[in-house]
Image (spheres, helix red, strand yellow):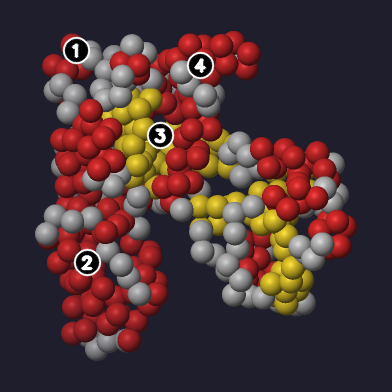
Amino acid sequence: MKVALIGPPKSGKTTIFNALTGQNNEVDKYSPPANEPNIGIVQVTDERITRLSELYKPKKTIHANIEFHDFPGIFAQHSDEPESAIFTGIKSCEAFALVIRTFKDDELDQLYGASNPLKVLQHFEEEMILSDMVVAERRLEKIELGYKRGVRTPQVQIEEKTLRRILEHLQENKCIRDMDFPPEEEKAIRGFQFFSSKPILILLNTSEEGFQEAHPALAEFSAAGYLAEQIAGSFEQELSMLDADEAQMFMADMGISQSIRDRITMLCYRLVGLISFFTVGEDEVRAWTINKGTNAVNAAGKIHSDLARGFIRAECFSYDALIAHGSEKHLKEKGLFRLEGKEYTVQDGDILNIRFNV
């Protein structure tokens, strides 16, 4: 999964990115804005993988990862080029983490205005909606030209119908993520990667002192249905440079039970609706990330396309059952080792072995 860290200039995106990834990119408020994103991969901490590795003692253990892209401040002013390179890069991410500055800084307040998280979110969503409208309108114009030339396939007609419905929704200043699409419409618009279709995690970047009290906007965002978290970005970046014991001591002083990596990665899983299943063996123990509700054949395809193409059955048991009973042998003796078909809905913590024939 790829997550875009976005937000107004000097909101602390790169500080939070450094804390997440352990990198040391420039964060001085006087430094000029970057011309391209910083990219870092963060391993998803999952104690289940650790326990499975202890049981199977594989040659290698592979955790799930999230790829974070730290983009320069966008939407600082309206753009008439929503298909520019940097916007295309942002669109390629599955989710947004919107960083909003809530710490006080007189110079930044003079340049960008005092912190007002609700207005920042409103501004971003309005700009995303405007950009999506431009893309939808341009595509509809091309479809109309195609109709005049005799190009009127069923697929194009579904696309046109869907885009017109989207455009009407956007014109009411509503985000695409609030809409529901049947499978054929979802397929028709998948390639557009509309801004306002992406789920948003709101990160309120505060000072170390401000972290001790929840910002009032947190409750308002939650009431409006947004996933929001308060982060002391500079403090978290300093923590990321310490060894584990030192970091744990300072975290305890701040009342933080988990590292920023663990907190943000789990929030991203919740945001997008992701779960993990596992494959195990002497060669490899590995976590696989899928959307909640994925069936067995599509989960098999996540491992390799051949497994989906030649799918016969999924041998399945749960992580919790394995830990409770200690071995696959005991699971089989107790009837907890199952054979599931293509339409079985994979559950978080399932351990799968795919039977297939190509």
- Location of residue 40 in the rendering, given as x and y in whole percent from the top left corner: 52, 34
- Give the number of the disc on residue 285: none
Can residue 271 be seen by looking at this rendering? yes
Pick the residue in front: 161 or 244. Answer: 244
- Give the number of the disc on residue 166: 2
Q: Which residue is drawn at 17% across and 52% down?
A: 130
Q: Residue at x 58, y 67 (%)?
A: 345
Helix, strand or loop at label 1? It is: helix
Amino acid on which disc 1 is placed? Glu
- What is the spatial separation of the Cα atoms under label 4 and label 2, in whole angstroms? 45 Å
Mark positioned earlier in the residue sequence (1 or 2): 1
Kindly check if marks 4 and 3 are in contact, taking CB atoms under 8 A apart as contact.
no
- Location of residue 63 in the rendering, given as x and y in whole percent from the top left corner: 66, 42
Report the residue marked by disc 1.
107
Kindly check if marks 3 and 1 are in contact, taking CB atoms under 8 A apart as contact.
no
Compared across the picture, whether 263 is left or right of 233 comes to: right
Pick the residue in front: 178 or 81. Answer: 178
Report the residue marked by disc 4.
251
Pick the residue in front: 344 or 113. Answer: 344
- Location of residue 171 in the rendering, given as x and y in whole percent from the top left corner: 12, 60
Helix, strand or loop at label 2? It is: helix
- What is the spatial separation of the Cα atoms under label 1 and label 2, in whole angstroms? 41 Å
- Give the number of the disc on residue 70: 3
Can residue 33 be seen by looking at this rendering? no
- What is the spatial separation of the Cα atoms under label 3 and label 1, in whole angstroms? 23 Å
Determine whether 309 is above or below 128 in the image.
below
Helix, strand or loop at label 3? It is: strand
Q: Pick the quarter of the image with the C terminus.
A: bottom right
Kindly check if marks 1 and 2 are in contact, taking CB atoms under 8 A apart as contact.
no
Determine whether 19 is above or below 315 in the image.
above
- Seen as rendered, the residue at the extreme bottom is 150
